[in-house]
Amino acid sequence: MPKSQSQTSAPDIAARSPSHLFYLSSLRRPLIDRAEGIYIWTQDGRRFIDGSSGPMVANIGHSNRNVLDAMKRQMDRATFAYRLHFENEPAEELARQLAAKLPEGMDRIFFVSGGSEATESCIKLARQWAVATGQPKRWKVITRFPSYHGGTLGSLAITGDDALAETFAPMMQVMPTVPAPTAWRDRDNLTMEQRGIRYADMLEEKILSEGPESVLAFIMEPVGGAATAALVAPDSYYPRIREICDRYGILLIHDEVMSGAGRTGKFLGGDHWNSKPDIVALSKGLGSGYAPLGALAAPMRLVEPLLASGGFQHGHTYAGNPLACAAGLAVLGEMDRLDLIANAAEMGNLLLGELNGLAKRFPFIADVRGKGLLLGAEMVADPDTIRPIPPAKRATQRLLDLAYERGLIIYGRRVKGGVDGDNFMVAPPMIVSAEQIGEIVAIIGDSLQVLATEFDLPVEG
């Protein structure tokens, strides 16, 4: 490995002018020079493997020429057209093609600029539908804990994450929660299928305790994102959730911001269980990092009452932006041309097997999970008792830093309400090859070996 790749920070950072930007921390990072495929190069010549597609965004890889050319053609025609003044062909065609890939009847599309806008649009659509259909008492949106559905106050209110929400709780209407289906942690005599039913039935218990007439919707990620590191429920969970929502007239919202657009080996994560929601939120991979883009999808039976009562009282300036939609249209085209959803399934199975191999070598990896190329692994101090690694050690961040020093970007966040619980997520672009997966896994293995030594974690062989 070149010596320069063992340094977390670029050598030129000290010489750079102070930054006027601020984000999560004051940590400086190297300046990006260019990106292509699954690789990113910095201005000082280092190469990084984008093993997480950024925050699970760059589904079709970086700098795809066909997408860039489509954007250039649109830029030469028009970059902005306000939806109240004009329709535009890219938005119309993207909506048509997107609807064709969604479950039958999910054929009304509302474009947004990102994931938080998408989930917030879903709950506002649900609420306006309830009011328009004579159900104004319905306003509660039940969510799971832990979960993540966005950073605006509306989407944060349906996010089960103490670390993110506590500061802003007085400013928003915090919604009721049920436990996320972390069935792998349970130590009981139930089968996984029985555990799935038990977790689903917790939703019914919550509905009854809140009062069914007050509950509007239930929102969930079919395959978990950053808050649960690609958590997958037992198969029995999904049909029972649908059954419970139908029983009480509650709308089922699938947050597919991270799991949608082919990443899991199906166009939607919920497609693995033929689980049909009432409303879907999409973003991230839909624009694949080429332009800010997201979408809400719903059936006409939900949209028509809104239109009849005055329209959807919601919207943002860049909704249906022609340049963003041209990018999204080209992204869908490349997914089909390169058969990337099938590749995500095939390479995901290969990567899952390799991660399970690492779990045998490093038994402090207590669970490996996910679908397709949305995979995660949870780390603990004691695999028998599932005792967590002390939060003060910041094990997740240390592993991410070790991988970064070796030229690999992976993702992680504390998975027990944002407070503790260590994990890492591996979600390379859907163009990844078997050889590249080998390179990714080798770097993760080297990084885990160092982590085990530093934190005195168990290693086999």
Image (cartoon, helix red, strand yellow):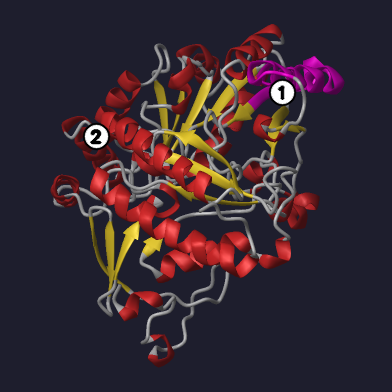
Type of amino acid at the residue the image marks with label 1: Tyr
Q: Position of residue 410 (x, y in %)?
A: 44, 56
Type of amino acid at the residue the image marks with label 2: Met
In this orientation, which residue lies closer to the viewer: 427 or 293?
427
Q: Quadrant of the N terminus?
A: bottom left
Q: Is residue 106 above or below residue 361?
A: above
Q: In this view, which residue lies farthest toward the bottom? A: 15
Q: Position of residue 257 (x, y in %)?
A: 47, 38
Mark 1 and mark 2: Cα distance apart in space: 35 Å
For the residues labelled 1 and 2, say whether their Cβ atoms are less than 8 Å apart: no
Q: Position of residue 323 (x, y in %)?
A: 26, 46
Mark 2 closeness class: few <14, some 14–19, many ≥20 residues within 10 Å = many
Quadrant of residue 408 within the rendered picture: bottom left
Query: Can residue 433 be seen in this snapshot?
Result: no
Q: Position of residue 359 (x, y in %)?
A: 52, 45
Q: Magenta residues? A: 190-218
Q: Is residue 236 above or below residue 156?
A: above
**67 sits to left or right of 348:** left
Which residue is at a point 55% across and 15% down the rendered structure image?
Answer: 305
**437 sits to left or right of 386:** left
**Of labels 1 and 2, the one closer to you:** 1
Residue to which mark 2 is pinned: 335
Q: Is residue 341 above or below residue 451?
A: above
**411 part of magenta stretch:** no
Which residue is at a point 43% across and 57% down the rendered structure image?
Answer: 444
Residue to which mark 1 is pinned: 199
Task: Determine the secondary structure under disc 1.
Answer: helix
